[in-house]
Amino acid sequence: MNKPRCKTDIRVLHGFLNATGGNWRNSVHIECNVCRYPPCDRQDFLFAPAEDGTPLLMPADDAEIVFGRMIDKSECLGMVSNARFQELFALFLKKYTGADPACPLLRLCAEQSKREDF
């Protein structure tokens, strides 16, 4: 039996845990139900602002691995669709939108894992 593995970088996990006080319920659930991008392997995300206000995203499936339980979106501080989140952070996400039609939320997750300052 293959156990799922967490794909989020440890530095991003650390930042997310610090931002939420170690409790995923202190985050906002981003529900990916209005997608303009090709299908991806991630469905939903958890969002918390970092200390400097930049958005930290953790894929919900990674959060389930880290916290050892199913994430119930109704227990989060709030819920927002991916389309509304992308509108809210449009200027910030602009640098994660390229020529190819890839999801900027997935790009942000990938870029966060590359950054050294978490």
Image (cartoon, rainbow, N blue to C red):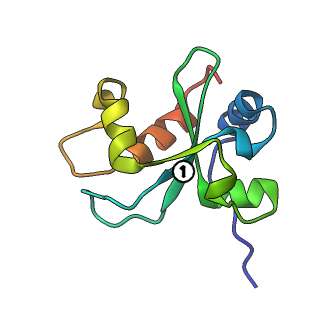
- The quarter of the image holding the C terminus is top right
Q: Quadrant of the N terminus?
A: bottom right
Front one among 73 and 91? 73
Residue 68 is situated, as x and y percent measured from the top left of the image, at 81, 61
Residue 13 in picture, x, y percent from top left = 70, 39
Residue lying farthest left? 99
Name the side, left or right, on which 40 lies relative to 90.
right
Residue 45 showing in the rendered view: yes
Q: Nearer the viewer, residue 37 or 44?
A: 44
- Residue at the spot 64% in from the left edge and 41% down from the top edge: 77
Residue 60, above or below 26: below
Q: Amino acid at mark 1?
A: Phe
Count of marks overlaid on the render? 1
Quadrant housing residue 117: top right
Element assignment for label 1: strand
Question: Crowding near pointer 1: few (<14 within 10 Å), some, many (20+)?
Answer: many
Q: Given the current orientation, which residue lies at the most extreme top position?
A: 52
In the foreground, 75 or 47: 75
Residue 99 x %, y %: 18, 42
The structure residue drawn at horizontal position 27% and vertical position 38%, both measured from the top left corner, is 97
Residue beneath disc 1: 45
| Snapshot quadrant of residue 98 | top left
Is residue 6 shown to the viewer in this render? Answer: no
Q: Is residue 75 left or right of residue 80?
A: right
Relative image position of residue 96 (x, y in whole percent) = 33, 35
Question: Image height check: is 2 above or below 44?
Answer: below
